Amino acid sequence: MNSKLTLGAAAALTAAGIIGFATFGMAENDKTAPADTVASTVPADRQMTIWRDPSCGCCDAYADYAEENGYHVTRIDDRDFDKRSVEVGVPEQGLGCHLAEVDGYYVSGLVPVEIIQRLTSERPEVTGITLPGMPQNAPGMAGKSGTLKTYAFGEDGVAVYSNE
């Protein structure tokens, strides 16, 4: 009789453990579902992935600016973002302070969101656009003021995309 009681208790503990594990697993899935849902419900032209040097404060300020303007931003620390930029076609003399991807286009530097929105709505046959360097009057620095010259790059070379 003692062995039946011990066997019953062991079975009950095993069942409780399985139920607890299953409940924990479902709770973990519930925690990750909203993030997946958010990314899948955001239109492609409003999703932005930024590869940036983790010690660059202006890149974080720019990502915040993009989020404030309706973008879902994924930030990736990448000290070699400049090499990645050149690999995707950004001209070496035109490198910005980070690399982003938006709706199939590459965006190098602190490009104002109005210009990115124009790029993704017009859909020109280019690889992407770049705002070289770190202009003091660009978003992520002191904020957009004055004129910023943005260049398009792709198979046909480099050309001015925007001068506004």
Image (tube, grey):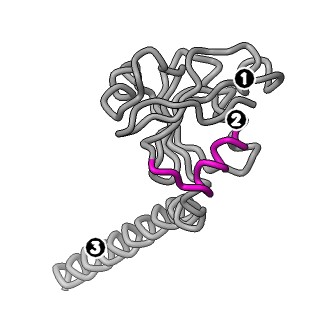
The image quadrant where one finds the C terminus is top right
- The residue lying toward the viewer, choosing from 43 and 162, is 162
**Sequence order check, earlier mark of 2 and 3:** 3
Q: Which residues are magenta?
A: 112-125
Residue shown at 45%/28% (left/top)? 77
Disc 3 marks which amino acid?
Answer: Thr
Residue 115 picture quarter? top right
The image quadrant where one finds the N terminus is bottom left
Q: Are marks 1 and 2 in contact (CB under 8 Å)?
A: yes
Check disc 3 and report its element: helix, strand or loop. helix
**Sequence order check, earlier mark of 3 and 1:** 3
Q: Are marks 2 and 3 in contact (CB under 8 Å)?
A: no
Name the magenta segment's main secondary structure.
helix
In this picture, is 2 found above or below 147? below
Residue 114 picture quarter? top right
**Sequence order check, earlier mark of 1 and 2:** 2
Look at mark 1 in the image and give the residue it sits on.
138
Left or right position of 50 against 20: right
Q: Position of residue 135 (x, y in %)?
A: 68, 15
Between marks 1 and 2, how big is the CA–CA gap? Answer: 7 Å
Question: Can you tell which mark lies on residue 14?
Answer: 3
Between marks 3 and 1, how big is the CA–CA gap? Answer: 61 Å
Question: Can you tell which mark lies on residue 24?
Answer: none
Near mark 2 (Cα within 10 A), the count class, few <14, some 14-19 or many ≥20, is many
Left or right position of 95 against 42: left
Look at mark 2 in the image and give the residue it sits on.
112
Q: Position of residue 102 (x, y in %)?
A: 52, 48
